[in-house]
Amino acid sequence: MKSKKFFKIIAGVLVFLTLPSLLFFGFAYFKYNEDLPTGIQGEQADALASKMLEALDYKAFEATNYIEWTFKNRHHYKWKKAKNICDVYWKEYRVSLNFNDASQNKAFVHSFRVDEDLANELIAKAITYFNNDSFWLVAPYKVFDKATERRLVTLENNKKALLVTYKSGGTTPGDSYLWHLDNTGKPVSFQMWVSILPIDGLTASWTDWTTTESGAKLPIFHKMAFFGLELSHIKGTL
């Protein structure tokens, strides 16, 4: 009898914990889930992408040689953009990534260098962190990256949006983002069709910006459904 009561309690706890989550996911799915829109490739799509870059002063971003930021108070980055290297910090770990020469990657625990399996594990994790966290910082500047596909999408209100699909590269190739822009071409939000999210078409804001010392415009906060995503300690220098 005691074991039967124990399993009933466990089952009750599981229902208590999972039912609200299931209800929340169901609500979010039916509220936000959308099919990937279709659009037209060509000069008009590229022109809208160029307008977005101009609105964000792409030249100032390109001239920025060093960027530093913290993602969600968890991961900190010192990115020597001009040299294509970045130091990634989290918990007691530091990984130095060299995007030009992977053999130069190094991993540290409490300032002591580690090798072999542990180093490989930390380096792989740092690359995943960088790919994700830097995208939330500089995604608008990546619309003409290699293996990107741009499409012009006409929305129901006849406004134009820019659909960008990353065919390769990064951690999750094949992801698509629909950029919504204001009249000047500056981003206000994007919708995501990405493999790591169970809901297609989820929207994240791109309305909170800071201008660095170098003139680059970078975001400091994104709102996504009921959640917020903060980027802090942002520096950008020539």
Image (cartoon, rainbow, N blue to C red):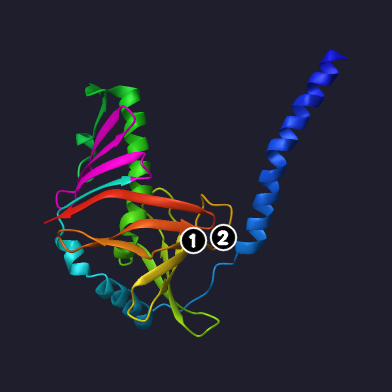
Classify mark 1: residues with Cα within 10 Å, few (<14), some (14-19) or many (20+): many
Which quadrant holds residue 156?
Answer: bottom right
**The N terminus, quarter of image:** top right
Is residue 97 visible in the rendered image? The answer is: yes
User: What type of secondary structure mainly makes up the magenta span?
Assistant: strand
Q: Is residue 56 magenta?
A: no
Residue annotated with mark 2: 200
6 relative to 188 in the view: left or right: right
**The C terminus, quarter of image:** bottom left
Instruction: Check the image and name the residue furthest to the right.
Output: 1
Answer above or below: position of 76 versus 155.
Answer: above
Residue type, mark 2 in image: Asp
Which quadrant holds residue 107?
Answer: top left
Q: Is residue 87 magenta?
A: yes
Give coordinates of residue 166: x percent, y percent: 40, 60
Q: Nearer the viewer, residue 12 or 175?
A: 12
Evaluate if marks 1 and 2 touch, with contact meaning CB atoms under 8 Å apart.
yes
Give coordinates of residue 211: x percent, y percent: 23, 62
76 relative to 201 in the view: left or right: left
Answer above or below: position of 229 versus 86.
Answer: below
233 relative to 160 in the view: left or right: left
- At x 25%, y 75%, the residue is 54
User: Magenta segment, which residues?
Assistant: 71-98
Residue annotated with mark 1: 192
18 relative to 4 in the view: left or right: left
Q: Secondary structure at mark 2?
A: loop
Mark-to-mark CA distance, 1 and 2: 6 Å
Which quadrant holds residue 145?
Answer: bottom left
Classify mark 2: residues with Cα within 10 Å, few (<14), some (14-19) or many (20+): some
